[in-house]
Amino acid sequence: MIIVRSTAELGRALARSRELGKSIGYVPTMGALHDGHLALIQEAKRRDDVVVASIFVNPLQFGPNEDFESYPRDEETDLGLCEKVGADIAWLPTAEELFPPGFGLTVAVPRLSSVLCGQGRPTHFAGVTTEMSKILILLAPTAVYLGEKDFQQLVVMRAMVRDLGLPVEVRAVPTVREADGLALSSRNTYLSLAERPIAASLFRILTDLTTQLRTESGEVAAVLAAGRRQLIEAGVHRVEYLELVDSETLDPVPEATSGNRLVAAVRVGTTRLIDNVEV
Ligand code: AMP
């Protein structure tokens, strides 16, 4: 595995593969890698000739009172894991190079970015799309691999790639979970021992609700209201949202149809967790 930091080094590392017309699969991450990230790298490995994984805690996607400073960072372990699952190139971009002094660009998909997570994190998705548009143009991969865990991010990214006309395929990878259903997340390390089972109740309740939505069509509002109560009873401190949405527009749907997404964000203690399940 080749480790590169600057875009010049990245360009050199990929030059021969580009000449040979090899496909390049790209996996963006913020590090603190777990099996969810590794599933993306493995899927890229399966489908593309060359796999580039990036590790970069993107400052643009954190709000002023969020966890940018305390976000878990462990470069050495992450590089070992990238190598182990077969990444060809690990790219560790620097903020200085991606966002040099005077950087004034914003790439945003405002409507899709303002709903759901966008309500509590108004600048988050513009931070993601600004960074990702720049990276996708610099790297020009064949495909970018994103997790369904961050469902809204996936929808926003698909819209960004489509609207910019970028020649990259967005490929979604299913959420990897712990044995009890908790979606793997770098932020799970913030959970205390007592909070851990409460966090797992999120997926269990979402799964129960999708079963109800499948069978009790027309009762979406009542099912969601009961779901919010169940989450609180399970020990969740706050339900930021629990909605049934169209999987492309993210608009709330009044009646459940196949392919809709049940999406949620909750607080367990001070830790914010998101998850989603397809109906
Ligand atoms: P992050 O490091 O949190 O920015 O995540 C990098 C990529 O990994 C994103 O595309 C996430 O959706 C994806 N990802 C994070 N957690 C999981 C998971 N549990 N299963 C599958 N993909 C995930």
Image: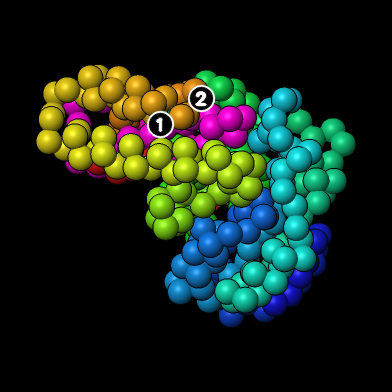
Q: What element carries label 2?
A: loop
Q: What stretch is highlighted in magenta?
A: 247-275
Residue at the spot 26% in from the left edge and 39% down from the top edge? 208
In front of the other: 103 or 239: 239
Vertical placement of 115 versus 246: above or below?
A: above
Would you identify the image quadrant in which residue 226 lies? Answer: top left
**Image coords of residue 144 (percent x, y):** 52, 57
Left or right of 260, for residue 139: right
Q: Is mark 1 on a helix, strand or loop?
A: loop
Vertical placement of 55 versus 248: above or below?
A: below
**Image coords of residue 123 (percent x, y):** 63, 26
Left or right of 157, for residue 278: left
Vertical placement of 183 versus 23: above or below?
A: above
- On the question of residue 123 being in view, the answer is yes
Would you identify the image quadrant in which residue 4 lies? Answer: bottom right
Which residue matches tag 1? 234
